[in-house]
């Protein structure tokens, strides 16, 4: 290899390690045999890889800068005793250290953040509407109080792994048509941690955490609905090695109510009236969903026997809806929904002799002994609409 190694990578002689790696990645993506089948590109790739193998090694780079032979007197070509790391090629294509690169090179940390946890909590409609404070039981991993998270028994501590010498990974070398390929794999002896706990804590088995059932108080805000999640920061699973806890999410499920159904922030209910009350009009006393106001202006989700009067106008038809503003569910963002009351008029199915006599008398007075019914303008039968369509053509 007669060309200057720095010129091969296109970097200055004082380039740092990051600059060298970026230059090599860029060239490898262009010249790798899997990407560029041109034989000239393959030769170029071998030269670039050999140059990077030398310049990325501080000792070989220093020897080269002093004018020495970085290849140890060999012919100077790639594959003539020059080795390279397979992870560097993986870096070029994936931006990391190849398989398992998400953890980076070096030993894995024993202390890691714990996972988030999720529990489901059923509340009543009034509790969801006006908020409630509830005590819940959760079963999660907590910090081991015996070893305080380090995983070692009292009087002992982790020691450096002799297999990987604390690196957390070991190199495996194999030969190929490209030369020697060196891959890094997690150390099986220490599972990639770089240290071994010779005497693990008997309480947690070296994990630094144990499972425990505990009580928590959760405040459910007013206006939640089924599917709403309340986040409790750092109340989830404690991480391995006593790492910081994840978050706990409380997912709300609102139980069905015997009177009201909820649509967004609106409440709906249906009342059934006899036809005489719908015709003459009446006043009904209906329950409503409210919250009890206690000391210091706080609200508790207690459903009261609160009632209000609803005026039914004379001549109310079945299906009529009456909207009561501001009697629905409070919104999480402020304001409050409405209460929608639907009226269903009930027609009697059994009449006594006197009742039938009175109804016939009323029908005679109103001229309704033989009603023909009413058809809205434009309401035609299917055959009528077909006839009109053919006549139009």
Image (cartoon, rainbow, N blue to C red):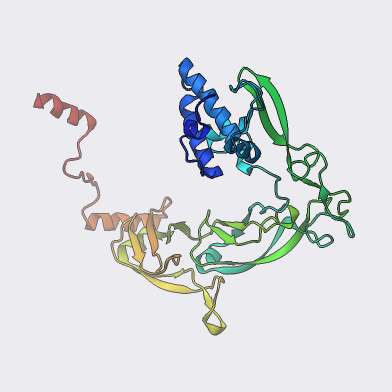
Q: Residue furthest front?
A: 67
> Residue at coordinates 66% horizontally, 54% vertically from top-left?
113
Q: Can residue 34 be seen in this view?
A: no
Looking at the picture, tell me which residue is in the foreground, 2 or 144.
2
**Which corner quadrant holds the N terminus?**
top right
Tell me where residue 211 appears, x and y as whole percent. Answer: 77, 55
Looking at the picture, tell me which residue is in the foreground, 288 or 231.
231
> Residue at coordinates 52% horizontally, 39% vertically from top-left?
20
Tell me where residue 254 appears, x and y as whole percent. Answer: 55, 57
Q: Which residue lies furthest to the bottom in this view?
A: 296
> Residue at coordinates 22% horizontally, 44% vertically from top-left?
372
Viewed as shown, does residue 16 lie left or right of 85? Answer: left
- 283 shown above or below 261: below
Looking at the picture, tell me which residue is in the foreground, 239 or 103.
103
Looking at the picture, tell me which residue is in the foreground, 175 or 125.
175
**Which corner quadrant holds the C terminus?**
top left
Viewed as shown, does residue 166 lie left or right of 391? Answer: right
Q: Is residue 297 visible?
A: yes
Tell me where residue 252 appears, x and y as whole percent. Answer: 57, 57
Tell me where residue 99 appears, x and y as whole percent. Answer: 62, 33
Residue 243 in which image quadrant: bottom right
Count of marks, rendered view: 0
Residue 213 in which image quadrant: bottom right
Viewed as shown, does residue 108 lie left or right of 147? Answer: left
């Amino acid at each position: 290899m007669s060309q200057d190694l720095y010129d091969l990578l296109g970097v200055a002689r004082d380039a740092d390690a990051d600059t060298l790696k970026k230059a090599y990645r860029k060239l490898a993506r262009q010249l790798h045999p899997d990407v560029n089948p041109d034989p000239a590109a393959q030769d170029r790739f071998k030269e670039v890889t050999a140059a990077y193998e030398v310049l990325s090694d501080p000792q070989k780079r220093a020897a080269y800068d002093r004018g020495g032979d970085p290849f140890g007197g060999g012919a100077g070509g790639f594959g003539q005793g020059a080795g390279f790391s397979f992870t560097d090629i993986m870096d070029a294509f994936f931006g990391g250290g190849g398989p398992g690169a998400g953890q980076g090179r070096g030993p894995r940390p024993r202390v890691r953040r714990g996972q988030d946890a999720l529990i489901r909590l059923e509340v009543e409609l009034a509790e969801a509407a006006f908020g409630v404070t509830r005590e819940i039981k959760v079963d999660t991993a907590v910090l081991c109080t015996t070893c305080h998270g380090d995983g070692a028994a009292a009087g002992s501590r982790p020691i450096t792994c002799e297999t990987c010498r604390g690196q957390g990974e070991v190199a495996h070398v194999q030969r190929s048509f490209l030369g020697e390929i060196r891959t890094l794999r997690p150390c099986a002896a220490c599972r990639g941690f770089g240290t071994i706990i010779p005497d693990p804590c008997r309480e947690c088995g070296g994990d630094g955490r144990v499972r425990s059932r505990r009580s928590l108080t959760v405040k459910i805000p007013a206006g939640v609905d089924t599917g709403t999640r309340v986040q409790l920061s750092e109340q989830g699973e404690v991480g391995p090695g006593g790492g910081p806890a994840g978050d706990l999410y409380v997912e709300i499920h609102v139980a069905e109510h015997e009177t009201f159904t909820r649509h967004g922030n609106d409440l709906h209910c249906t009342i059934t009236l006899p036809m005489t009350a719908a015709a003459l009009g009446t006043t009904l006393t209906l329950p409503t969903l409210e919250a009890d106001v206690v000391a210091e202006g706080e609200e508790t989700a207690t459903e009261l026997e609160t009632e209000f009067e609803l005026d039914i106008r004379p001549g109310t038809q079945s299906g009529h809806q009456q909207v009561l503003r501001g009697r629905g569910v409070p919104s999480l963002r402020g304001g409050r929904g409405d209460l929608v009351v639907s009226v269903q008029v009930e027609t009697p199915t059994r009449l006594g002799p006197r009742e039938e006599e009175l109804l016939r008398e009323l029908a005679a007075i109103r001229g309704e002994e033989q009603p023909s019914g009413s058809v809205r303008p434009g309401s035609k039968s299917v055959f009528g609409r077909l006839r009109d369509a053919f006549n139009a053509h």
